[in-house]
């Protein structure tokens, strides 16, 4: 019987998020659509080729207006309603789990439609700040796989490499576990590495490409970690010295 409730819950949540998607997408399309209509009316007297060019340009610009508007709408919605994740262990069928799924789904609306165009730009920092992340100065994001922003803290001048995964949640034995990820200043998070919930990375540390930091891993300042699962080069050197 419980599995039926889970399936019904998933179905109802999916339909609810489809409705939210229609609302956010519909509202975000308005500025670009208004601009397109203006160009359409303005170009009625033009010959076909120039008119097609201007209409095509208006559609392209409309897409970027859509993406930036979507970021602002979702960010303002999260901020106004103060949607933040609470650290801890929560049942899958709980309010905290629903809130996590809801916030994650809002981020996916941007992730699947526009985020590739704002990586390594100030707009990426704006997005993650609006989603609740605490960021220092000059943080560089080159990955769209940064989830659970309200559980994320990153210091000044840190670089998140392409395809890196930073995640503040994990599901184990039917429980949703939420824990902050804290990354210090001047840290390099290598491409396609994975940072799990509860990880803390000290200042000036380097996480090598494709490394996997298991949950609750503590990385000391200026240390270098690599491998699957990731290990400390400093500790490896200490072990060799004592042998």
Image (tube, rainbow, N blue to C red):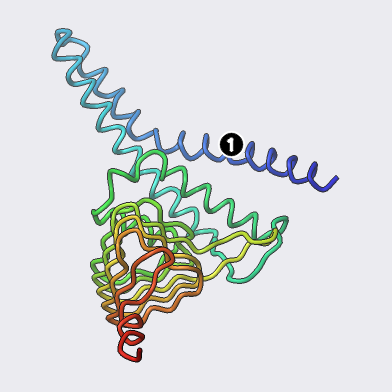
Decide which of 88, 27 is in the foreground and name it: 88
At horizontal 71% and vertical 59% (from top left) the residue drawn is: 94
Q: Is residue 165 left or right of 52 when viewed as pictured?
A: right
At horizontal 18% and vertical 21% (from top left) the residue drawn is: 54
Decide which of 233, 60 is in the foreground and name it: 233
Vertical comparison of 205 with 3: above or below? below
At horizontal 40% and vertical 52% (from top left) the residue drawn is: 145
Question: Residue 105, image x and y in percent?
Answer: 53, 47
Decide which of 121, 160 is in the foreground and name it: 160
Disc 1 packing (10 Å; few <14; some 14–19; many ≥20): few
Q: Is residue 229 left or right of 226 when viewed as pictured?
A: right
Q: Quadrant of residue 86?
A: bottom right
At horizontal 15% and vertical 11% (from top left) the residue drawn is: 49
Q: Is residue 180 left or right of 18 when viewed as pictured?
A: left
Instruction: Point out the image quarter for the N terminus.
Output: top right
Q: Is residue 102 left or right of 113 when viewed as pictured?
A: right
Question: Residue 194, image x and y in percent?
Answer: 41, 60
Vertical comparison of 144 with 15: above or below? below
Vertical comparison of 106 with 141: above or below? above
Q: Residue furthest front?
A: 243
Which residue in the structure is indicated by mark 1? 19
Question: Residue 197, image x and y in percent?
Answer: 50, 67
Question: Residue 70, image x and y in percent?
Answer: 40, 43
Is label 1 in a helix, a strand or a loop?
helix
């Amino acid at each position: 019987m419980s599995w039926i409730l889970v399936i019904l819950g998933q179905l109802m949540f999916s339909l609810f998020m489809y409705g939210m998607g229609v609302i956010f997408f519909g509202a975000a399309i308005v500025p670009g659509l208004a601009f397109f209509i203006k160009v359409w009316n303005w170009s009625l007297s033009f010959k076909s080729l120039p008119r097609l060019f201007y209409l095509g340009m208006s559609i392209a610009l409309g897409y970027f207006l859509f993406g930036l508007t979507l970021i602002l709408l979702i960010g303002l919605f999260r901020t106004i309603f103060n949607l933040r994740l609470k650290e801890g262990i929560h049942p899958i069928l709980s309010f905290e789990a629903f809130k996590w799924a809801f916030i994650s789904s809002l981020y996916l609306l941007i992730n699947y439609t526009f985020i590739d165009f704002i990586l390594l730009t100030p707009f990426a920092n704006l997005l993650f700040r609006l989603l609740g992340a605490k960021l220092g100065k000059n943080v560089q994001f080159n990955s769209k796989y940064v989830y659970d922003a309200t559980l994320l803290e990153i210091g000044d001048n840190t670089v998140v490499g392409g395809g890196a995964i930073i995640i503040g949640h994990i599901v184990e034995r039917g429980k949703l576990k939420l824990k902050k990820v804290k990354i210090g200043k001047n840290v390099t998070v290598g491409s396609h590495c994975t940072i799990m919930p509860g990880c803390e990375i000290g200042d000036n540390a380097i996480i090598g490409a494709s490394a996997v930091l298991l949950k609750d891993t503590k990385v000391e300042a200026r240390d270098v970690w690599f491998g699957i699962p990731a290990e400390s080069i400093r500790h490896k050197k200490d072990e060799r010295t004592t042998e």
